[in-house]
Image (spheres, grey):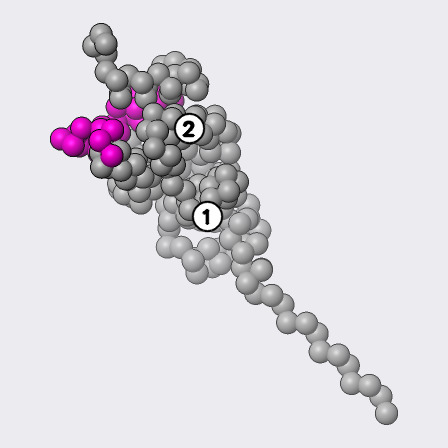
Amino acid sequence: MAEKPKPKPTPDSTRRSEKSRRAIYEAALALVGEVGYPKTTIEGIAARAGVGKQTIYRWWSSKADVLLDAFMDLGEQAARAAGQETYEIPDTGDLAADLKLVLRATVDELEDPRFEIPARALAAEGVVNEPLGVVFITKLLEPQLQLYVKRLRSAQGKGDVRRDVDPRIALELFVSPLAQRWLQRTGPISYAYTDTLVDYALYGLAPR
């Protein structure tokens, strides 16, 4: 009696979907860095990723949504590389040291071509494309800034920061100058620069 043929293994749709998603992220970030946001299209992303256009539309409604998820994925990868499942600003009890550590990591990220090239393209587009700017600020930038708010509030609770200080404004003392220098290329960014920003923000400019 002939043996029955063994059933073929069922394709792993989850693995295939994740592979496609990863290819789409990489294609989207590469394209926006190469041709800019206006010339980046769903069709172009699909062609570069080697997937059908409908595969993208199954998961996202626009190229802005694709790029937002791609950027968030970059952040998640960085967190995993640092041994964290979700990114949080350290709270060791030493506020200055914690802020300096995070800003040094930010310098590394800003100088990484994988992040820098598409980030510059999107930042430039966000200035003239208000809807895009609002989406990226609301969904990507502001959640990251709220991590600083959380850390500064913790410092307030321990008496390391005055209780009358607004953490959302205070964080701009060291975050905004770094962003401006990077975006406008008004000077080099370095660990020494961000360490100084933290010192000036926390200890002020008056003689001590």
Would residue 122 be visible to someone looking at this image? no
Q: Marks 1/2: CA distance? A: 18 Å
Question: In this picture, is 40 found above or below 170?
Answer: below
Magenta residue check for 90: no
Give residue 117's position: percent from left, percent from top.
Answer: 46, 30
Please tell me which residue is depicted at 26% across the width and 21% down the height of the picture.
202
Q: Quarter of the image containing the N terminus?
A: bottom right
Please tell me which residue is depicted at 54% across the width and 59% down the height of the picture.
17
Residue type at the position of mark 2: Leu
Residue located beneath label 2 in the image: 101
Question: In this picture, is 170 found above or below 75?
Answer: above
Magenta residue check for 171: yes
Give residue 65's position: percent from left, percent from top.
Answer: 37, 49
Question: In this picture, is 110 found above or below 130?
Answer: above
Residue type at the position of mark 1: Glu
Q: Mark on residue 85? A: 1
Q: How many neighbours does mark 1 have within 10 angstroms: few (below 14), some (14-19), or many (20 or more)?
A: few
- Nearer to me, 167 or 141: 167
Give residue 34's position: percent from left, percent from top.
Answer: 49, 33
